[in-house]
Image (tube, rainbow, N blue to C red):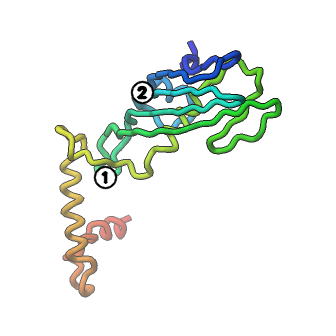
Amino acid sequence: MNVLAPFNIPILGLKKGIRSFDFEIDDAFFAAFEDSPIQSGAFKVHLDFDKKDNLFELTFNLKGNVATECDRCLADIRLPYADTQVLTVKIAHEVQEEEADIIWLTPDIPRLNVARFIYEYICLAMPYNKIYDCHKEKNPPCDQTVLKNLSGFAEDVVNNPEPEAEGDIENNPFKDLKDFFNKN
């Protein structure tokens, strides 16, 4: 079975009006896209599909989480995500080049598969820094030992940003790092 088949919306002969669709996104969805930067995630997508004269307006409401590694402590986390995106689909006999939020279809297309758009919206909205306020959770997933060590390291850097003199290298928080590179 094609994992992306449930994302087909029949559009040929569709009457004007708003229709709603709900989709569940799981790991199999992301695996269907080659070289996906997301390997694991769970999302609920609500789509409001509004057919108008010669165009469709699709409003995607996405909510869920992506499995990733925390950029602060390297622990496995479920990064929460929520977003709303609008896509306009215009119908014309001559298909034009796609734009950021507008695509063109010919009137004889029987269905529209929205999986690609959902996938792109999730991927493009992933933050560059994969962190969140996990300390607000009852059982935070972050590695508290790593965070404590980083906090201590940051205090050392603030209090001793550079050694006063060449002989004061023992007080430099970067001493271990310098020793490591000098050995290699």
In the rendered image, which quarter is residue 99 located in?
top right
149 sits to left or right of 89: left
Give whichever of discs 2 and 1 has the lower sequence position. Answer: 2
Depth check, front residue: 183 or 36: 36
Residue extending furthest right? 94
Q: Amino acid at mark 1?
A: Arg
At 33% from the left and 46% from the top, the residue drawn is 70
Residue 34 appears in view: no
Task: Indicate the secondary structure of the residue bearing disc 2.
Answer: strand
Task: Indicate the secondary structure of the residue bearing disc 1.
Answer: loop
Q: Position of residue 106 (x, y in %)?
A: 77, 27
Residue extending furthest top? 1
At 63% from the left and 26% from the top, the residue drawn is 51
75 sits to left or right of 39: left
Quick check: 141 above or below 9? below
Depth check, front residue: 92 or 161: 92
Q: Which mark is residue 60?
A: none
Q: Position of residue 179 (x, y in %)?
A: 30, 69
44 sits to left or right of 90: left
Q: Position of residue 164 (x, y in %)?
A: 24, 86
Residue annotated with mark 1:
72
Disc 2 and disc 1: Cα gap in Å? Answer: 27 Å
Q: Position of residue 58 (x, y in %)?
A: 57, 31
Q: Amino acid at mark 2?
A: Lys
Residue annotated with mark 2:
44
In the rendered image, which quarter is residue 110 located in?
top right
